[in-house]
């Protein structure tokens, strides 16, 4: 695979810095040691320490485990939420898209989670050959996948469901699920993740 563009590398480094700061902030707010954070998230103490020091780029699956363990949204580890509460907010996927983790998925956090709305909207690009099996998220989390370009499969209810452009699926994400692209071209989709009232506890 060719080396990523310099702009993508820069974005990834910025995301890594935000992730490290966010993880340290959440641990400080809760008064958690690395041991406690590891117990809550299921991610090893060594890995959490490496992430906080900016020495390791976790997979998206690991990011989800950390977010679930801290009862937070995924997007809160990728980007800060909008500061101004305007009702009109213009976002460009091309300006937000980056590779936030070590696996072959690009993410554009179009609308990060805000408690008043209860959801986050991500554009996901699954590169050819990508496959991820995800552990259950927090109770009540629901995902919506809408395919924009390419072909992909979503693991729901124990079976892989093929999806093409214009096709969509909604499923309970508090049970095992997954995503894959066995095609020769990237698959691009929107992923709207809805959190139940009162969760996540922190943004």
Image (tube, rainbow, N blue to C red):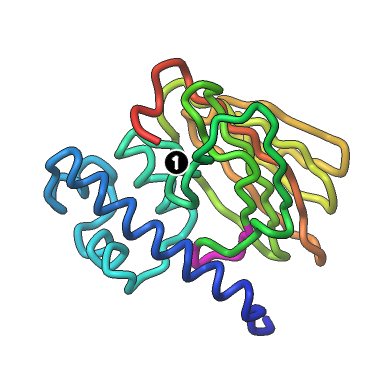
Residue drawn at x 84%, y 51% is: 149
Name the foreground residue: 83 vs 36: 83
Query: Within 10 angstroms of label 1, few (less than 14), some, or many (20 or more) residues?
Result: some
Nearest the viewer among 147 and 93 is 93
Residue 125 percent coordinates (x, y): 70, 56
Q: What segment is highlighted magenta in the picture? A: 101-106
Choose top left, top right, bottom left or bottom right for residue 201. top left
Where is residue 105 drawn, in percent x and y? 62, 60
**Taking 136 as reference, is 106 above or below it?**
below
Q: Which residue lies under the disc numbered 1?
A: 135
User: Residue at the location (62% across, 26% down)?
Assistant: 171
- Main SS, magenta region, reads loop
- Asked if residue 189 lies in the magenta stretch, the reply is no
Question: In front: 196, or 173?
Answer: 196
Residue at x 53%, y 30% (from the top left corner): 173
- Position of the N terminus by quadrant: bottom right
Q: In the orientation shown, which residue stands out farthest toward the top?
A: 197
Count of marks overlaid on the render: 1
Res 190 → quadrant = top right
Q: Is residue 149 left or right of residue 181?
A: right
- In the image, is residue 19 above or below residue 200? below
Q: Position of residue 157 (x, y in %)?
A: 60, 29
**Going by the image, does 110 lie left or right of 100?**
right
- Where is the C terminus found, in terms of image quarters? top left
Residue found 30% across the figure and 39% down from its top: 69
Can you tell which quarter of the image residue 112 is in? top right
User: Seen in the image, is 18 located left or right of residue 50?
Assistant: right
User: Judging from the image, what secondary structure is the residue with disc 1 in?
Assistant: loop
Compared with 102, 5 (above or below) is: below
């Amino acid at each position: 695979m060719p080396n990523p563009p310099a702009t993508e590398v820069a974005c990834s480094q910025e995301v890594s810095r935000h992730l490290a700061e966010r993880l340290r902030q959440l641990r400080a707010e809760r008064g958690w040691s690395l041991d406690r954070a590891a117990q809550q998230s299921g991610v090893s103490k060594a890995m959490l320490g490496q992430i906080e020091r900016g020495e390791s780029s976790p997979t998206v699956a690991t990011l989800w485990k950390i977010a679930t363990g801290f009862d937070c949204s995924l997007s809160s580890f990728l980007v800060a939420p909008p500061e101004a509460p305007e009702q009109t907010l213009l976002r460009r996927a091309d300006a937000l898209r980056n590779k936030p983790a070590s696996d072959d998925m690009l993410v554009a956090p179009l609308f990060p989670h805000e408690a008043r709305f209860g959801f986050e909207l991500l554009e996901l690009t699954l590169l050819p050959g990508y496959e991820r099996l995800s552990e259950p998220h927090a109770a009540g989390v629901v995902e919506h996948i809408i395919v924009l370009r390419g072909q992909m499969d979503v693991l729901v209810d124990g079976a892989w469901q093929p999806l093409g452009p214009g096709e969509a699926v909604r499923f309970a994400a508090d049970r095992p699920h997954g995503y894959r692209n066995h095609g020769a071209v990237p698959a691009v989709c929107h992923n709207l993740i809805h959190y139940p009232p009162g969760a996540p506890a922190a943004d």
